[in-house]
Amino acid sequence: MVAGSDTETEAAARLVSNARFADRRTWSDRIAGGVVRAGGIGIIASILAIVLFIFVEVWPLMVGAVVEPGPSLAVESAPLALAGDAYRTHVASLDADGWIRVRRLADGVETTAREIAGGGAPVAASADSDGRSLAALTGEGAVAAASLQWEIGFEGRTRVVTPKISEPSVFSVDDVALGAPIAVRDSRDGDARVVAAATDAGEIVVFRRQREVNEFTGEESASVAQSTVAAPADLSLLAIDDEQRSLVGVSAGGLLHRWSALDPAAAPVETVDVDEEITALAFLLGGRSIVVGTDDGGLEVWFETPQESGERRLTRIRRFPPHQAPIELIVPSRRDKGFVAVDRAGVAGIYHSTSERVLWRGSLEQPVTALAMTPKADAIVAGGPRGIEVLAVDNPHPDVSVWSLFAPVWYEGYAEPEYVWQSSSGTDDFEPKYSLTPLLVGTLKGTFYSLLIAIPLGVLGAMYVSQFMHPRLRNVIKPTVEIMAALPSVVLGFLAGLWLAPRVESAFPALLLMFAAYPVVIVATGLLWLQIPLRIRGQLPGGSEAIVFAVALAAAGAACIALNGPFEALAFGGNFQAWLRDFAGVQYDQRNAIIVGLAMGFAVIPIIFAISEDAFSNVPRNLVSGSLALGATRWQTVSRVVLPTASPGIFSAIMVGFGRAVGETMIVLMATGNTPIQDWNPFNGFRTLSANIAVEIPEAPQFSTLYRVLFLAALLLFVLTFLLNTAAEIVRQRLRERYARL
Amino acid sequence: MPFARTTDRTGTVFSWLCGGALAVNLVLAIGLVGLIGWHGLGYFWQASVASFELRDGSALIGEIHTVEEVPEDSAQWAGEQRMRVKIGNRDLYRLDFRWVNESEIASIEYPDDLVVLERLEWGNFYGRMRELRRDGEVIASGPQVWTRFGEVYEEKAAEREAVEALERGPIGDVNYAIEGLRLQRRRLEMAGDSTAGRLADVDQRMAAATARYEALAEELFAMREELKDTTVVMEAANGQTREIVVGEVVRSLRPNAMGTLASLRLYGSRLWEFVSDAPRESNTEGGLFPAIFGTVMMVFLMSFAVAPFGVLAALYLREYATEGPMVRAVRIGVNNLAGVPSIVFGVFGLGFFVYSIGGTIDQLFYAEALPTPTFGTGGILWASLTLSLLTVPVVIVAAEEGLAAVPRIVREGSLALGATKFETIWRVVLPAAAPGILTGMILAMARAAGEVAPLMIVGMVKLAPTLPLDHHFPYVHLERKFMHLGFHVYDVGFQSPNVEAAQPLVFATALLLVGVVIAMNLVAIVVRNRVRRAYSTSVL
């Protein structure tokens, strides 16, 4: 009894512990299940988040400018001209009483001021569009211009900007009163200043003031040269470009005149008719493009284009969507080819010439009398009777649009719209040319030539292995082809670029000869093979011919190379490249599309081979047996039964191969010249999207336009290959279902 | 009957053409591997050195590299043979190679006394030994020079090793310590004035380290001077002489006097140098050890990341997720990621790992080093993670296949015996699927070893001064840049100033890379076949 109760307690204890154990197991099972689920979903989600991240990096390209109202300053009268500093700390204004006043934006305190137009209110005013100087036409018919200097110092870790207004320089002509319009432009180093002003006599007087600093004494001296050009009497606007090379003016009837400021001739170099009355005028960064605003609210960009005759003429390049009121003022950005325009109703807009984008439009809610952009193009300073307003501008990527990335764009200095990729240059005022089209064409070109080689070799080879070859032999051949897939593309690229390219260059006719000779050699070898008595042939595993063919082809290849000289002499007059140049007008590049086709074809063959081999060998046996039983020959069965049944699988193989070729980087990087030119000539190099990323992204600063454009290229590659592969996968699954049903 | 025969005949011809296509593939595959093997292995072989006498009276010494027909565009020599001779002596001739036309040659001889000196700088020197000097005085001349040189060389080689050991060891340590102190000081400065006492302490340690550095530098300087005291006077082909510091000679040989055994020993020693030494002369000479090390370390780091995640995702997809259109779509998506171009992953790695994560880490933990980035620039960690993203689909697909291949009965048996689902997976399914998963891992590693494009963006460099693994705490430096075999092929083959001379080395590198990748693939194929056989023959 005692013992019995003992066993009972023991059993009870065991039961409890078993239950605990079971509990623990259930719990651990649940926890493990949860971990696997969470981990699995997390990993898959994060893999798929790659595309999201890339998209997020690209998205800002598509967004316009964000403009936020900033500090505003009250004024006594509407300013005539304005300028701001690079750190948005101060604003300088030329006021109606002839004073330049610099006010601090933080508290509106006037930090410095100077009277430049002595003797009352200025008749007209002008600001250098880079904000380096302000000029006023005085009542006495002289032009006074003062430069603004923003001295930057540090108090501890805080930056302090100290504005200075220089002693004004006064430009006047004896006996002649200068009149409106006037224009001023300082050189980048501030040493040369050009001032232009109209006279009543139908002339423009151009002053060029050169400042020189004596290196020993530190003394400054200035010399002023003066010249006169003939101009229409009703001149209404004048502008000088950044390089101080040319001067443009506007007269009634929408006429735009251009003079050379370097060499002032008596008459305008050129006059064009803009059709509408011009109400605003500005040079864009770099001084090549001219923006005009018209009295019907239109905005147009003009620049000189080379003509067939060899001269250059001002040409209307593009128009922007018009404003509702006449354009009042235009100021260029000092960072890019963009500009700000404001109309008489106070509606302003931010535009970019290259991308033809309207980045922002909004009302300034007062008639604007003076407009400026800060040096970093991060603020608009607008002045009117109600005060000076500073609007913060966030406009990181004005220079590309979907249109400019894919369609032809008329770049400065080009004769017509073109597709160009040229992301950088030595100068600051360079117009970046981001056209992805030549790169897309390059990608397709490389893919085309490599598929031209890979499809027949891969598909036919797979057909032979799966249909004609004995399994024993197949088990040796298939891994050999799989090894081809494993060869690193950098090695293929190296061989193609450094080993193959120079050899093909010197023996291109031999390559042609090989293509022609191969079918002949194979048929001849096959006929010879048939001469071997069936007794011996029958003992070899099926498909042994292929090994014999390989030996014959290797020998034939060597023979073709040996025959290169005589063949070249016979067919191409001894020099293939000269022949190509003379007869086809084509230059032979050493690293060209054919080399890439061969190397990338080699990389794609095993992919096409593997997938189509799979499709061929999975064709249901009963179909093949049925066909053979009905008396069809082996080839008839293959061509009429196996091939049609497996064709979706082959399509899917080609799609996957296409995807691989599209994204291949190292081979194209090493085996082409990487020149982004757009043509289909097999003897030229090209640049693909992928190689372009590899070449350019190390030079692209984070979040720059180039950086985001390269991300866009990556996104394109991702989407393209993903779609191709998905299509291939779906086709393959359908095929599998069909096989299962057959 | 005649109809049947005709169709059969055309059919046979077509089948031959298919066979021909396969034959082309085979010729290409075998030819390519053979080409790399031939050139790659040939790199280590020492050719005989020829002494040419030319018709214009001048002489040449060098190795004959290739013999070919003169291209037709040079009318003067058309139809003739010419040879490319490696003449070395870059300090005298500037170029390593020159072409010699057959008709220019009066005679070619292979005298035993021709010497090849492999040097630390300026490449090989070809010529004859004339004198051995110590501190400017002749200590050997004439025929004894060669034997005497051997002794001196041994002595100097030991001295050079000592110099290198000093540079790598104590001096490297002191430099590392100084850099650490500099950053510590900067950190204290950024923290504010309250730490002035510690600042003084750091300054004191800095002064001590600097003093130690100066002492070591002086020692190094003295050793270097001593290394330079012995020179050998070499006479080039046309009688120009050149005094070469013995301490700068890596290897000296008289190839024409070497027997087969000596040649093979030399071959072995060069092969060893190739895999164990650091590169010289902007990677065009010396060994590849840092690149091999970098490649291996990166692949292993990648494996650590990819194996658990890949298997976890596969387990979820195959064992836990309810089969349906959603899971099927995810599976296709994951599968297709394997086909997304590698450069896309590189771009992602740059934007996400390097700039976003690395940049944030720098601001939080390495602010004292800014603006020099620590993690905010390409490095081995980011390269490995980028590659693991690239290869994770391969592992997921292979692991899923492995899991799917485990027969249903096995699971049901385990479940019927009362095991929970996780126990079944952990104890029964995973071990059975392990070979399949392993195959996937090997394929992933092979792919990672050969991949270059994404790494060019996220962390490889031409020449890394330090390995990402060393004796300085914390021993593994994941932020460091590294060298890579694949990038070495690209860089030396296309960016080096002396592409011509470097090409044989590139072939050797390519051979090494191809060898590693093919070996891994073969292992994967064998494992896969074993697994298939195991399941097809098992009673289960």
Image (cartoon, rainbow, N blue to C red):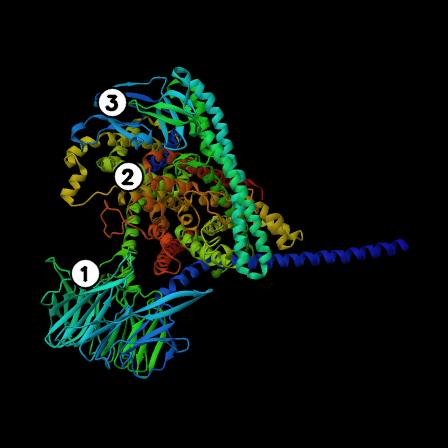
Q: CA distance from mark 1 to mark 3?
A: 60 Å
Q: Which residue is mark 1?
A: A416
Q: Residue at x 28, y 42 (%)?
A: A595
Q: Which residue is mark 2?
A: A501
- Judge depth for marks 2 and 3 and give the one in front: 3
Residue type at mark 2 is Ala
Residue B373 x, y percent position in the rendering: 46, 54
Q: CA distance from mark 2 to mark 3?
A: 34 Å
Name the secondary structure under disc 1: loop
Looking at the image, can residue A575 be seen? Answer: yes
Residue B70 x, y percent position in the rendering: 22, 29
- How packed mark 3 is, by other alpha carbons closer than 10 Å (few <14, some 14-19, many 20 or more), is few
As drawn, which residue projects farthest toward the front?
A: A217
As drawn, which residue projects farthest toward the right?
A: A1
Q: Is residue B199 above or below residue A292?
A: above
Residue B207 x, y percent position in the rendering: 55, 47
Residue type at mark 1 is Glu
As drawn, which residue projects farthest toward the top?
A: B143
Name the secondary structure under disc 2: helix
Q: Which residue is mark 3?
A: B58
